[in-house]
Amino acid sequence: MAIKKIYKRKFNTATTWTAAVAVRGITPPNKPHTKGGFATKEQAEEFARIKEQELLSRLEGIPKLNYIQFNEFVVKYLELCEMNNTPSHFESKKSVIQHSIAPFFNKKKLINIHPVDIETFISKRRNDGSSQKTILSEYTILKHMFHQAIIWDYLRINPCEKVARPKVSQPLPEFLTTEKIKQVFRFIEENEEYHRCFYLVQVLFYTGCRRGEISSLRWSDIDLEQDIIAIQAHDNWQPKDYESRTIE
């Protein structure tokens, strides 16, 4: 849908005409193509007519946008996540969306959500007392949701792209001292019921793997000849950030 506006401006004793043209799906929100300085209204109207045709021509072959509401989109998005995410990852994402994100945007149409709305959401979460890490997590999920909306032809522009990524102060990592590690091994040796965990704990300490990575290991992931462990996806389990890696 094209929107054209023709209006006149006065500069001292001179009067000129200005034309503004916007096409939903092509022109960025609140930024119509504008040109002024026309001597007559007819000239401005002619410019607007030509510009409208030029912008509309870009829509050829592009599917019409579906003006879906945010809460309706959430249902479809979660269905996709349930198919593609691990159960634990899905439940975590679902909880964030249903308790924090969805209530804020609710029945607002996706096409009407702009960067300023994302900024307002972030500010509200800060005022609610949410931690920096929580806000960053919510922003990341929102950005992915709008990315998927573009794939599904609900949007042309991701409103999160123009919003600064919330910053999180990274605490210094904590490391176990040699004495602490020895204490853990002594505890295992002194308690027979934990003997079977001895080698598992060794792998955790000396590789830096996460608990889920260790519990998802298979013999095929371990190369004893080259002393290599492969951390990679298996069935319904995925490494963090979906990135496989090897540990030597």
Image (cartoon, rainbow, N blue to C red):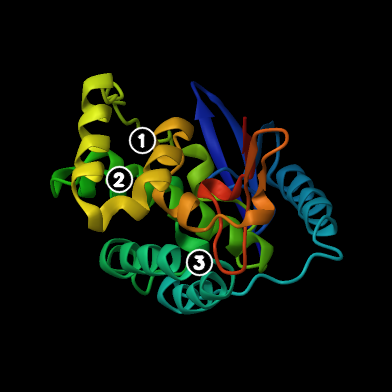
Q: Which mark is residue 135?
A: 2
Q: Secondary structure at mark 3?
A: loop
**Amino acid type, callout 2:** Ile
Pointer 1 and pointer 2: residues touching (CB < 8 Å)?
Answer: yes
- 126 up-or-down from 76: above or below: above
Residue 161 coordinates in the image, percent (x, y): 53, 41
Identify which residue is drawn at 66% across, 50% down. 221
Task: Report the Cα–Cα distance between label 2 and label 3.
Answer: 22 Å
Residue that carries the numbered disc 3 in the rendered image = 86
Q: Secondary structure at mark 1?
A: loop
Residue that carries the numbered disc 1 in the rendered image = 166
Residue 115 coordinates in the image, percent (x, y): 44, 46
Which one is earlier in the sequence, the residue at label 1 or at label 2?
2
Mark 2 closeness class: few <14, some 14–19, many ≥20 residues within 10 Å: many
**Which quadrant, please, contains the C terminus?**
top right
Image-quadrant location for residue 119? top left
Mark 1 closeness class: few <14, some 14–19, many ≥20 residues within 10 Å: some
Identify which residue is drawn at 80% across, 65% down. 62
